[in-house]
Amino acid sequence: MIIIVSVVAIANFVVPINAFSFSIRVVKYFILLLGTLFGLVGVVLGFFMFVTYMVKLDSFGEPYFTLIQDTAKDK
């Protein structure tokens, strides 16, 4: 248990951008809350909801989880 806590504590300092670190922390606590209330089913449900949210995101008009592909347009 001590090793897990120390790894999580060190992992909190790996993300260099403070705003990104905050969003990761919020998602982590949300999944932790679901895991506390519903066990393993809650953790799986939390990750499923997180992946579903990431799939719906758009970045510069392209879906966030799009595979890298050739987007050359015919002229």
Image: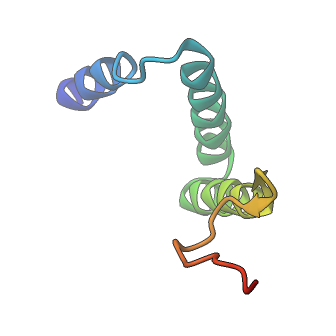
Q: Residue furthest front?
A: 75
Q: Residue furthest bottom?
A: 74
Quarter of the image holding residue 31?
top right
For the point 33% across and 18% down, the residue is 9
For the point 67% across and 45% down, the residue is 34
Q: Nearer the viewer, residue 25 or 73?
A: 73
- Depicted 64 relative to depicted 36: above or below: below
Q: Position of residue 15 (x, y in %)?
A: 42, 23
For the point 54% across and 21% down, the residue is 21
For the point 76% across and 56% down, the residue is 53
Q: Position of residue 57 (x, y in %)?
A: 78, 54
Q: Position of residue 61 (x, y in %)?
A: 81, 57
Quarter of the image holding residue 44?
bottom right
Quarter of the image holding residue 10?
top left
Q: Nearer the viewer, residue 23 or 57?
A: 57
Q: Nearer the viewer, residue 63 or 33?
A: 63
Left of 6 or right of it: where is 61? right
Total residue callouts: 0
Quadrant (top left, top right, bottom left, bottom right) of the C terminus:
bottom right
- Depicted 17 relative to depicted 69: above or below: above
- Depicted 34 relative to depicted 43: above or below: above
Quadrant (top left, top right, bottom left, bottom right) of the N terminus:
top left
Left of 40 or right of it: where is 34? right
Left of 62 or right of it: where is 3? left
Identify the colour scheme used: rainbow
- Depicted 32 relative to depicted 7: above or below: below
